[in-house]
Amino acid sequence: MTIRIASRSSKLALAQVEEFVSEYQISDYEIIKIKTEGDIKSAKGETLFDKAHFVTDIQKCLLSGKADIAIHSAKDTPAKETKDISRIFLLSKSSKDILIYKDAVKFDNKMRIGTSSLRRQLQAKYHLGSSNVFNLSGNIDTRLEKLYKGEYDCIILAKAGLERLKILDEHTYEEMKWITASGQGTLAVEYADYDLEEIPGLNMQLTYDENFYHRCHSLINADRFVLDKINADCNSAVSIQTRIQEGSPYTSGEIYGKNKYISFSGWTPEEVIKSIERQEGMKLLNEHN
């Protein structure tokens, strides 16, 4: 049986599908390419929209039965669960952001930086001391083209995207030390509410391997639990990451306000939320609304 896989039509989205089918040795598949509302808005240069617009049209394809599964960048999936849709996280690459230079090999805070992400804009402000941060929209190719045309001195992108496209080594870049968005570098597989084992030809045994599961799925879900509780979305100026530390999940991150930021951490979601509340993190989060 041919497995129908729904995906955005960008180069990166299709590279993600190819990585998935290669990892799980799926040979009989069809890619259903979908131009989402998010793609349309991004092509128009819009940046202030819910990143769930990259996912919703694909989820409709699943619910209508036109596709069996969908492959997303986990970072684009909303923290809140979607009715009648199940999701697993797997196949991680680097979660880091990188600063790609046009000419220089060392950062100067007077450089003109391009990024469409509010989180990255404020991280550049607080962690790089930059005041020259400007909006940059479009897919990876478009952003790189604008960089090399001289519209920016450097731009911020996810390292995983360039790794998946196999173009990372073509550029001069510096890896940022800051924490990024929940799920950055990880793929998400979505499907309508039924057992994945019911799809003939879909071999997903690795998903349920205990170590693999804890490294991907459960850790990102810990992030999402916190994000849901503080009512953050894909556009919120918050970084968060849960990792295994001393044998247990440990969550850390930052919330960026207009004039200051806070760092939070904890061994449990309750500890994390208390850390945020104690430092008035919700007030900072809501400054951008």
Image: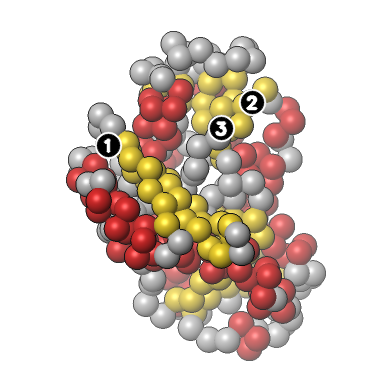
Secondary structure at badge 2 equals strand
Count of numbered marks: 3
* Quarter of the image where one finds residue 127: top left
Which circle, 3 or 2, is nearer the viewer?
Answer: 3
* Quarter of the image where one finds residue 112: top left
Secondary structure at badge 3 equals loop
The residue that mark 2 highlights is: 173
Which three-letter amino acid code belongs to the residue tagged 2? Answer: Tyr
Give the spatial CA distance, label 1 vs label 2: 27 Å
Direction from residue 59 to residue 278 in the image, left or right: left
Direction from residue 19 to residue 73 in the image, left or right: left
Q: Position of residue 90 (x, y in %)?
A: 62, 64
Which circle, 1 or 2, is nearer the viewer?
Answer: 1
The residue that mark 3 highlights is: 176
The residue that mark 1 highlights is: 257
Quadrant housing the N terminus: bottom right
Q: Are marks 1 and 3 in contact (CB under 8 Å)?
A: no
Pick the front one: 259 or 288: 259
Residue at the far front in the pictured view: 246
Which three-letter amino acid code belongs to the residue tagged 1? Answer: Gly
Direction from residue 224 to residue 175 in the image, left or right: right
Q: Are marks 1 and 2 in contact (CB under 8 Å)?
A: no
Secondary structure at badge 1 equals loop
Residue 4, visible in the rendered structure: yes
